[in-house]
Image (cartoon, rainbow, N blue to C red):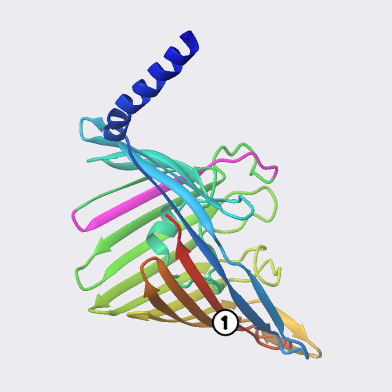
């Protein structure tokens, strides 16, 4: 009898507390299934045809009013099939801007400099995507000006001697009305093969359904490049054009290093071109089509991929 009364009391208390909990924290769960087909042609006699999971995921996010104009927030997302982490973020925001920490999270560089809206094979020629994990970020701004700073700290043996910060990012953005402009720097510290800082600039503009984005990145001589030449300078550029459900993207990376092909010497400047289309079938259902071609700029044949993915939102 006492056990039944205890269980009944807990049930009543849970029902009564639900509205209070809901008002204290505004959270939501979401998830989607993505399954599709990819054909890869690398110039060999056989083409590779694959049916597979293509990024199905599940996550939750929410925020809570902390009073005094401040809000606490969090975001957690994982791959649905293998459980790999896709997003982990926790922070506080208010009139001062926002401060957050996390892994697999868009920090300063990626938040301000990204020009890649393709699903799969775009953005390959970027020199860097910036800090992804073990980092804390502050982002703020006033009027048309925005800025961000990120510090990454992880336990890795390649840290530079006596360095407590492994990677630093600083970014500055300006909304000019007809265009949005951003410039940022990311610098990674290592004891061996310590690369120079990468500096980038991004310009974005929209006119009705048309969107255009261009980015340029440059890095002085470094050992961490596509051919391992310690004196090689790297540059990359990417142009992306969107029109309603269509996307076109072209990216190219250039290096001052040389690579020997047979008896001839040639620069190695790989490039990638992407075309995609999103077909909405109805509520919570779409098909994403993408064609990508990569020119390795070596004796190897170009590689092309055709992809079609069916996506359904389950929550």
The structure residue drawn at horizontal position 57% and vertical position 82%, both measured from the top left corner, is: 271
- Rendered location of residue 11, percent (x, y): 39, 23
The residue that mark 1 highlights is 271
Q: What stretch is highlighted in magenta?
A: 143-157
Q: Residue furthest right?
A: 262
Quarter of the image where one finds residue 67: top left
* Left or right: 58, with 147 as reference point: right
Taking the magenta stretch, the answer to whether it contains residue 135 is no
Kind of element beneath mark 1: strand
Question: Residue drawn 30% across and 60% down?
Answer: 173
Q: In this view, does 164 lie above or below 243?
A: above
Visible in this render: residue 122? no
**Which residue is located at x 32 percent, y 35 percent?**
25
- Label 1: how many Cα within 10 Å (few below 14, some 14–19, many 20+): many
The residue lying toward the viewer, choosing from 23 and 199, is 23
**Who is closer to the viewer here, 116 or 125?**
116
Name the quadrant containing residue 241.
bottom left
Asked whether the viewer can see residue 17, the reply is: yes
Residue 83 percent across, percent down from the top left: 61, 50
Q: In which quarter of the image is the C terminus?
A: bottom left
Give the residue displayed 42% in from the left and 72% down from the top: 215
- Relative image position of residue 144 (x, y in whole percent): 21, 58
Task: State the residue lying farthest toward the front.
Answer: 1
């Amino acid at each position: 009898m006492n056990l039944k009364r205890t269980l009944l009391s807990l049930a009543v208390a849970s029902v009564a507390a639900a509205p209070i909990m809901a008002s204290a924290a505004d959270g939501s769960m979401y998830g989607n299934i993505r399954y599709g087909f990819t054909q890869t042609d690398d110039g060999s006699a056989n083409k590779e045809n694959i049916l597979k999971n293509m990024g199905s995921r599940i996550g939750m996010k929410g925020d809570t009013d902390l009073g005094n104009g401040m809000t606490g927030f969090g975001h957690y997302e994982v791959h649905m099939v293998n459980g790999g982490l896709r997003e982990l973020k926790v922070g506080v925001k208010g009139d001062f801007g926002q401060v957050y920490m996390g892994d697999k999270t868009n920090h300063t560089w990626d938040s301000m400099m990204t020009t890649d809206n393709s699903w799969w094979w775009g953005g390959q020629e970027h020199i860097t995507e910036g800090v992804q994990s073990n980092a804390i970020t502050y982002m703020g701004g006033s009027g048309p000006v925005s800025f961000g700073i990120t510090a990454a700290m992880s336990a890795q043996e390649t840290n530079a001697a006596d360095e407590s910060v492994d990677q630093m990012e600083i970014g500055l953005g300006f909304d000019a009305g007809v265009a949005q402009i951003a410039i940022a720097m990311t610098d990674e510290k290592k004891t061996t093969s310590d690369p120079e800082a990468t500096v980038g600039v991004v310009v974005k503009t929209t006119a009705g359904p048309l969107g255009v984005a261009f980015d340029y990145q440059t890095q002085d001589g470094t050992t961490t490049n596509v051919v391992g030449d310690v004196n090689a300078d790297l540059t990359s550029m990417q142009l992306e054009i969107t029109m309603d459900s269509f996307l076109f993207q072209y990216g190219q990376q250039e290096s001052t290093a040389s690579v020997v092909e047979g008896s001839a010497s040639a620069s190695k400047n790989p490039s990638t071109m992407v075309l995609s289309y999103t077909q909405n079938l109805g509520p919570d259902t779409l098909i994403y089509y993408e064609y990508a071609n990569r020119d390795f700029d070596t004796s190897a044949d170009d590689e092309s991929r055709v992809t079609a993915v069916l996506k359904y939102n389950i929550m």
